[in-house]
Amino acid sequence: MLCLFDQATASSRSTFQIGRAIIAAAADLKKKLYGIASEMLEATELEMKEGVISTREEPKREVSIEEIMVYRFGLRGGSLTGEGEIRTKVPKGKAISAFWSLGAVGAEVEVDRETGEVKVLKCAIAGM
C-alpha cells in the first residue's frame, strides 16, 4: 500500500481517509479480477465466494483467483493492483482538511516547591 502525504496522520483521521482509499482500491482490484474472469468464463453475471468467481447462471462454471493469475501472467507470475484515492474538496486558496478534531485536557496538580515533584490529583480529558 502506498499512502501519500496528508496534513496529519491522527488516529481517526487516518482511519477515515486511508480506510476509504483502501476500500476504493479493493473495489478497483475486484473489478479487474471480474474482468479477467468474465473473459475466461465468457460470462458477465459473476459472483465471488471464498476466492472463487463463478457465473450466476451456472455456479459450477468457476475460476479461482490462482487460475486467474496463471491465465493473466502465465507461470512466471505477476501481480494485480487496485488503486483508490480520496480527495477532500478544497475551496480555492484554502488549506483545509476533511474534518478537524478538537480536544482539551485539564488537570489539578500538587507541586512540591522544594523538590519540583509534580503529582497529578485529578485529570479530565475531552475530545470531539
Image (cartoon, rainbow, N blue to C red):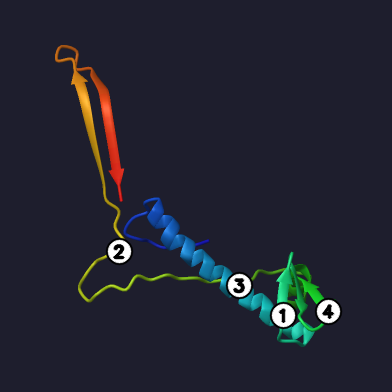
> Residue, x 73% and y 68% (percent of image)?
49
Residue that mark 2 sits on = 97
Q: Residue 61, labelled with which disc?
A: 4
Q: Amino acid at mark 1?
A: Leu
Label 1 residue SS: strand
Q: Nearer the viewer, mark 3 or mark 1?
A: 1
> Residue, x 53% and y 61% (percent of image)?
1
Give the CA separation, mark 4 to mark 2.
Answer: 47 Å
Total marks in image: 4
Give the CA separation, mark 3 to mark 2.
Answer: 27 Å
Label 4 residue SS: loop
- Judging depth in this view, the residue of 81 and 119 nearest the camera is 119
Residue that mark 1 sits on = 46
> Residue, x 33% and y 55% (percent of image)?
8
Q: Residues within 10 Å of mark 1 (few under 14, many from 20)?
A: some
- Judging depth in this view, the residue of 107 and 62 nearest the camera is 107
Q: Quadrant of residue 7?
A: bottom left
Q: Which numbered disc flags the more N-terminal residue, 1 or 2?
A: 1
Give the CA separation, mark 4 to mark 1.
Answer: 10 Å
Give the CA separation, mark 4 to mark 3.
Answer: 21 Å
Q: Which numbered disc flags the more N-terminal residue, 3 or 2?
A: 3
Residue that mark 3 sits on = 29
Q: Residues within 10 Å of mark 3 (few under 14, many from 20)?
A: some
